[in-house]
Amino acid sequence: MKRVIYILLSVCLLLVSFADVSAQTDRREVRKGNRRFKEGEYTEAQVEYLKGLAKDSLSIAANYNMANTFFRQEDYANAEKALTRVEDKAVTSADGAAFYYNQGAVAIAQQNWQKAVEAFAKSLLINPDDLDAKENYIYAKKMLQNQQQNQNNQNQDQNQDQNQDQDQNQDQNQDQNQNQDDQQNPDDQDKDQDDDAKDGDQGQEEQNQNKQNQGQQPQISPQAAQQMLQAIQAKEKETQDKVNKAKAAALKSRQKEKNW
């Protein structure tokens, strides 16, 4: 039997026929389909395989080779479905290694590297000497490692972006909280403004009082004014007496001199 062979990115699909399976009611249809397949008539081959499946829907050969026609037409989803229908029976047959090999080839075509690694590993457990299976296993494993590494890098980048966004959100929240505090506590601001206004009012009142004190004359009672007037008059009389005495003394002195 021949199988799907993947070497690097090149693909070569060859037909696998379960001709040694006994008591197959679909044997004739499967053989006709195999001949069509070898001639490259994949649609005609599918018709013959469908006839065989009409007789036995769980025919390993019909489903397996139907999967090969889907594979050659790059219909990998239907190829996988055809293989899945007979997986339980195929893996316990003499061709289990071939089944897992083709299952791995379909997985590689879909870039399902995890499933490809598992399928080729199972194929090698049954047939460890299959060099093609080893090459495809190594290739699929390498691609899986690259995929996982890329995912790790993307996760790290996403985490860094999330951390940066969180830091920015925290800064914005702090600014918003500060603004809310200022808006929610206007009494403090009003109090400060009131204190400043009071200080300004007090200073203005003091200035106004000083101006008033400077512009007003002191108020005195009539009695006090009379006493002040009498004191001034007494002072003036005393001063006048002193002046008169001085004049009399000077005149006397001149008289004496004249008598000389």
Image (spheres, rainbow, N blue to C red):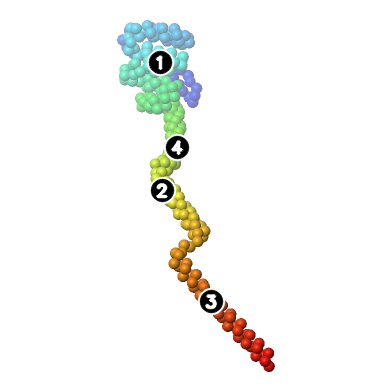
Image quarter for residue 36? top left
- So how many labels did they put on this image? 4
Instruction: Say whether disc 2 or disc 1 marks the residue closer to the N-terminus.
Output: 1
Give the mark toward the camera: 4 or 2.
Answer: 2
Q: Amino acid at mark 3?
A: Lys
Give the mark nearer the N terminus: 4 vs 3: 4
Query: How far separated are the C-alphas under marks 4 and 3?
Result: 102 Å
Please name the amino acid that badge 2 sits on.
Lys
- Secondary structure beneath dot 3 equals helix
Secondary-structure class at tag 2: helix
Which label belongs to residue 191? 2
Q: Which residue is mark 1?
A: 78
Q: Crowding near pointer 4: few (<14 within 10 Å), some, many (20+)?
A: few
Residues at discs 4 and 3 in contact (Cβ within 8 Å): no
- C-alpha span from label 2 to label 1: 80 Å
Q: Amino acid at mark 1?
A: Asn
Instruction: Residue under label 4, please give it.
Output: 165
Q: Please name whichever residue, 106 or 223, is drawn nearer the observer in this view of the structure.
A: 223
* Vertical comparison of 76 with 194: above or below: above
| Mark sitting on residue 237 | 3
At a point 60% along the width and 84% down the height, the residue shown is 248
Mark 4–mark 2 distance (CA, rounded to whole Å): 39 Å
Image quadrant where residue 91 sits: top left
Circle 2 packing at 10 Å, graded few (<14), some (14-19), many (20+), is few
Whether residue 15 can be seen here: no
Give the Cα separation between the discs numbered 4 and 1.
44 Å
Q: Nearer the viewer, residue 182 or 260?
A: 260
